[in-house]
Every structure is written in C-alpha cells, then in structure tokens.
Amino acid sequence: MSDCVHTMLLCLLFMGALGAEEDCEMLGSPEFPLLSKAGTLTIGGAFSIHSQISNPPLSFTDAPQPLKCSRINLREFRFAQTMIFAIEEINNSNSLLPNISVGYKIFDSCGSTLPSTRAVMGLMNGEERTLGKSCSSQSSVQAIIGASESSSTIVMLQMSGIFQIPVISHFATCACLSNRKEFPSFFRTIPSDYFQSRALAQLVKHLGWTWVGAVRSDNDYGNNGMATFIAAASQEGVCVEYSEAISRTDPSEQVARVVRMFRGGSARVLVAFLAQGEMDVLLEEAVKQNMTGLQWVGSESWITAGHLANERYSAILTGSLGFTIKKTKITGLREFLLKVHPRQDPQNNLLREFWEATFGCSVQSSLHGQTQCSGSERLQDVDNPFTDVSELRISNNVYKAVYAVAHALHNMLKCGLGGEAVNQTCTWKDNLDPKQVVKHLQHVNFTLQSGERVYFDGNGDPAATYELVNWQRNRAGDTVFVAVGSYDAALPNGKHFTMNGLNITWAAESLKRPRSACSESCPPGFRQAVIKGKPICCFSCIACAAGEISNSNNSAECSRCPLEFWSNEDHSQCVPKVIEFLSYGETMGVLLTAFSLFGASLTLVVSGVFFRFRHTPLVKASNAELSLLLLFSLTLCFLCSLTFLGRPSEWSCMLRHTAFGITFALCMSCVLAKTIAVVVAFKATRPANTVLQCSAPLQRTSVLSCTSLQVLICVLWLTLAPPFPYKNTAHATERIILECDVGSPIGFWAVLGYVGLLAVLCLILAFLARKLPDNFNEAKFITFSMLIFCAVWVTFIPAYVSSPGKFTVAVEIFAILASSFGLLFCIYAPKCYILILKPERNTKKNMMGRNQSRSQ
C-alpha cells in the first residue's frame, strides 16, 4: 500500500479518535507548501507562520469548509527564512554534502493541531491532491524541522513516527517528547521543560517568593510544563495559590475571569507558562482591566518575544524574569532577511502577504481603496520582529536543526570518505531509509562557526543551559532583555542556578524586590505551624518552648539546646545555663558565713574565759580538760560549715562531709564523756578525788575511741566511693545546680547515723542524771542541749531531702550552726554567767551544795 493511502487512513484514525469524521474534510487535501525549492534531498519545515485560525460553522448538512489561517506571525516567518538561509549556506559549502543540492518544503502549522496534521500529510505525500493519482513509495522529505508548539509537534510525530521520518523541533519543549519509546524519531535543539520548570522553581525559591500564582496554556506544552513546575516548587517549599489554564480560542469572558482572579489573589508573583498565542490574548485582557503590580516570571516561549516589549505592555511586563536559551549571532542572516521581496517569487502569496503586512500597502491593484505599494519600500527602514536579529535564540535553534540534518545525511552518504578534500563527492542512494537518517542524527556531533557544539543525548535532547533574562529599560526608554543569571543542568552537586550580581528591575520598575508570601515570615525564636485546611506556605508563627531555639527565619521546627545550654530570652540561640551553687557573695551565703564566724568567735571567747578561770571551783567541777576540748570541737563545727559554701570541687566535696562527720563525732564524744563523768561522780562510793583521778584516763580513751571510729568510717567512705562534684540538670531545666554527690549513700548515712547514735546516748545518760544535786546539775543542761541537737537533726532529714538546689546546702549549714549554738549556749551559758557576773557563787562550798553538807 502506498504512503499516501497510509496517510489518509491515519487521518481517519486520528480524527475518529476525536469523534469527528468531517475533520478530514476540514483539513482539505494536502496543499502546496508556502515556500519550496527542489533539490536532490529535501528538508521539510512546519512553522506557525499564521497565528489565527478560522472556526467554520458545522451545519451537519453541508461539507465543512477547509480551515483557513490568517494574521501573519513575523517572528515565525523569520524562523522559516532562517531555515532557508541555512540550507542555502549548505548548498554553497564544499565541505558539507558536496555535489548534493538540498531543497526545502515549508508548510504552515498555524500553531494548531489540525493544520499541523495537514502540514505533515503534505510533507510526507508530496503535492498530490487526490487519491486518484499514484503516490511514490518514499516520503517527499528526508527530515522535518518543526513545529513551534509541543501539541503540534506531537500530532506530526503520531503520523510521521510510523514511517520513522525524523522530526527536529526548534521550539517544542514538552518533557513528554523525551519519551524515546513513544517518540523514537524525535529530536530537538531546545532543552526540555523538565529542566526549565525546575529552573523556574529554583528561581522563585531563591528570590524568596513562597506564594505564587500560575497560568498556563491549555495544551501539552503548558499542562506538562506547569505540572512539572508545581511538583518542583513543592519540593522547594513554594506554594501555588491558583493555577489557571487558558487557550487562545477561549471566549473573552473566560480570559476576563482569569485576569480578575489574578487581580484578586494575594500572590504578587505570577508564573506564566504560556505560548505566544495565549500570552497575546491574556495581555490584551490585562490591559483592559489595567492589571499592574504583578511580578511576572515567564517561560522561554514569550520571555524574549520582541513584539511584546512595547509601550502598550510595558506597565505590565517591565521587570519580568524568565529563562531562555542563550542568544548568538548568525553571520549573514540579517543581510539575507533584508533581501526578502515579493519579486523573488511574484506568484508566492506568502511573500506578498508579508510585504503588505509590513508596509501597510497592497502589492496588487487595490479593490477597496487600500494604498498600493510604490516599489520603493525597503526592509532596511523597518524595525519589526522579522528584521530584528539582536535576540537570535530560537532562530539559532532552527539554524542548528538544519545543520544537524545536513551532518546526519553527510555521514549517511559517506561524503568525502574516499578521497581528497577538494572535489569531495557523496555516495548517492536512490532510496534513503528514514531509520538510517534517525540513526545518524542520534550520533551527530559537530561545532558551528560560532563555536557552539551540537549533539543529542539518548532522548534526542540537547544540553540544558539557559540564561536568566530581566526586562529592563535602557536610557532611551526601550525595553531590553538583560542577562542576570544562568542555569546549567550539567553542573555537579545540584548547583545548577547562579546569578551574576547585576541589578534587577522588578515589577512596575520598583527598586525593591516584591514580597509574595501567604504568611509573614517567622523571625528567629519562632517556628512555623501549619494552618489546618491551607497550603503548607500558609502558617502561623509559634514561639519556641523554653530550652528550644530557632536561629533562622521561617524555621519549620525548633531545635532543643544541648544538655548544658539553655535558650536566651529571644529563643534565637543557646547560651550556657546558669550554674547555681551557694556562694560566699550572695545574701544567704554572707549571712551563713557571718553566723559561722560569729559562732566560732564566740566559742573562742568562751574558751578564753574558761582558760582564764581554769583554777576556780566551777571550772574544775566542770572538768576543765573536757570543757576546753568540747569548745575546740565546737569551734571546728562552726568553721566546717564554711566548707559547704563556694563552688564545689573534688577536694571541697570530700572535705565538707568528712570534716562535718569527724568534728561532730569529737563534739558528741566530749559531751558523752562529760555526761558519763557526771553520772560516775555522783554515783561513786569512793572519795571524789579518787574518782576523778580514775575517770580522767577513761574519758580521754572514750573520746579518742569514739572519734577514731568515725575517722575509720570516713576513710572507708573516701576510699571506696568518695563524694564528687555533680552537675544536676534534672531538678531545674533552665539552670545547672552544682552540688556534691555523696558518692556512696551508705557512707553518708553511716557518718550521719554514727553522730546521731552518740547524740542519743548522750541524751539518755543526761536524762538519767537530771535529778542530781541542784547546785551542780550539769546533766540538766546537757539534756537540754541534746534535745535541741536531736530536734535539729531529726528535722534536718526531711528538709534535706525535699530542699531544691542550693537550699539543700543551706539546710545542712543551718543544721550545723543551730546544733552547735544549742550546745554552746545550753552547756556554757550558765557557767559563763557565774564566772563573769556572779563570781561570789564560784566557790567550792557552793559547788558542793546542801546535800554534801548534810552528809558531812
């Protein structure tokens, strides 16, 4: 079956899927190309040379009229002429396809799918207009350049792909076209939207815009590109307030509704993934509604479109940002374009239409009063999208696509392999297999005169590199496209996007970058809390809890400070925790130190008094040696409380507990010895002197023995598990309590329990001796002192266990001072009163009392 029949069947299948068999009639039979030239090899082209397409009425009674395209697109016409320029360059070259003439056939795709179908049918079948004529068994073109839209390109590939005819697009960016299984014969010289969409998401995030609006073309280009952008933006933490789709064929009410949404939305940044047709329609409606103040971020399809950079749209688009491919210069192209004239082909309707649209005159005699062209019109005097070659970006893609086909055919025909560089020839083949063309296209790798390298990856895509352009005004007031950054997908470590530090013009020519966020930024010390039912970019700011910080804006979580650190007042950084201990400098420390020194001083004064009156009866009766030893131990008890003050260290922790245990054991041993001495003295049947002489060694032995036992307990404690300084972070989270850990609780309570045991023994003996003669009843005073001592230390236990932080140490010092003062005042105050104020009572007779007199 011939290829033309194949094509008609494809049309029926394709249109049948759309549910409209009449659409094949609407397409009409394949028409003649708009521009063509015969050659040994032919390269086809499909460009959106016209931007408006008619929608003929469907009556369902008459055959539908063929589609008609109108309103010439000068930019697309430049693309077509660039293709012709590249082919002419190749034909004039001796090194590329020598002795082979390359022709071309260029059709109009009108930027729509149905005309694109008609164009690809014409490119594959040739110029036959009916099925009655015979068809050749080979496609009329070896490759197709085009189309300018992704949807049109997909339609062309669905037909040409069956015959493996390669299609090289200069402007179709849909990421779906990289699917090699579905489109094995597709190549392109413009990067995939897979990279552009991610570049746009990184740009928006880099500029701090987390709340954006989005609009797209309702076709494969817009829908696929925007879907990729939204997914990439979500990964970057950017939210989309709305995403609208428009088509250039939509009714004006639909476009007006979309513009009203832009104006009513809270996002101040608009990402526009639009083809030029939709962009034109949208801007016209934006002008009607006077929509200004939005920061536009655009895709490569319109971001460098020169016809948009005019005074009419300047209030809307000035400051726009977007990625586009790098611009270049094509030597000789401008001169070639300026030579375009209807005289080149007087029968060509397209050239005539171009001339009339450019100069506003009629080439032929006017039938409706239109001005007739004088013949003196010159393109050199015109500045329009056709003659403007200052921004050759997409035109360069067309140029590269033509050269890629030429190099593939050159390699396929083995041109110049057999001989000298001069007069090279190619091995001609009558039937060129399209699959072989595809194979050689996949492996092309060459460098243009501009130095740009051209090659395709495994998916038929080129290297993904972009320029970030910004719409700025020059001194003359004209809008220019200034490169302010770049994007290279091949860079390692994910650092694809960079900005070159140039000043950027923002929306409405503001000097300040616009702000676009759903919620105000959370300062350091706060975290984001997602608001239920709203996107992740809409949040409230919650202050970090105590002990947690956030040191950057918009922190998602607060981080907890390390164990020995705490958050400052702003919760913006961790600072070392306040270390708490009972120091000498604070008020409580000063008071306890004063009482301790006062008690020690008072004890020394009492010792001096006793030493001064050591030969008096009262002192002798009180056992001067034990009394002075007891006063010495009380002095140590007062002073040992000072070891509990200050910053705990290893030596102070060991000293404070052992000093406390040994001094109080010595004190209790002395009191116990005095109590025993009193009891023995008044219970003995021997004379008093004999009793005292016998009891003195016994007293010394008992004091030494009782104290030595406590020393032994302390040595064991220090040897096995000594006390040590400890940072207590459990009791108070905001501060560190520096305290002494007892090391071994058994050792601590053994020392304390031993002192308590001695105190209880003293209390019992003193209580038993309370009814001795009144004039010398020292046991009564010892009883009072022991009651105070025991009461203090029994109260100390629960207070010690329950007191927080440094108050634990204060309770311990208070217990030491209280018990020491109790012993000092209860035992020695009555004696000092007699020694100092009542010396007449300090006699032997008075000490012996009435009972003694009676016995005598």
Image: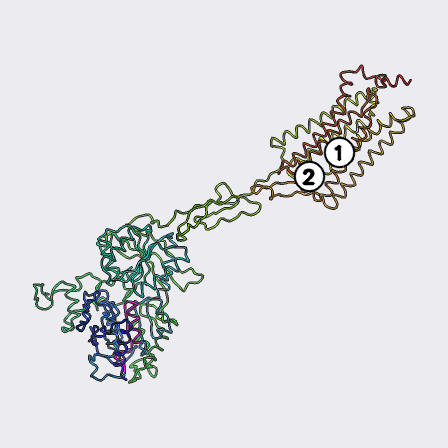
- Indicate whether 210 appears above or below 427: above
Which residue does the numbered mark 2 point to in the structure image?
652
Residue 733 at what x, y percent from top left? 57, 43
x and y, in percent, of residue 374 in the image: 9, 65
Identity, as a three-letter code, of the amino acid under mark 2: Ser
* Circle 1: residue type: Phe
Residue name at image x 60 percent, y 32 percent: 586
Mark closest to the chain's N terminus, 2 or 1:
2
User: Height in image: 79 above or below 201?
Assistant: below
Viewer-nearest residue: 314 or 60: 60
Which quarter of the figure has residue 607? Answer: top right
Decide if residue 206 is on the left or right side of residue 292: right
Q: Quadrant of residue 848?
A: top right
In depth, the one of 356 and 402 nearer the eye is: 356
Residue under label 1: 664
Distance (Cα) linking label 2 and label 1: 18 Å
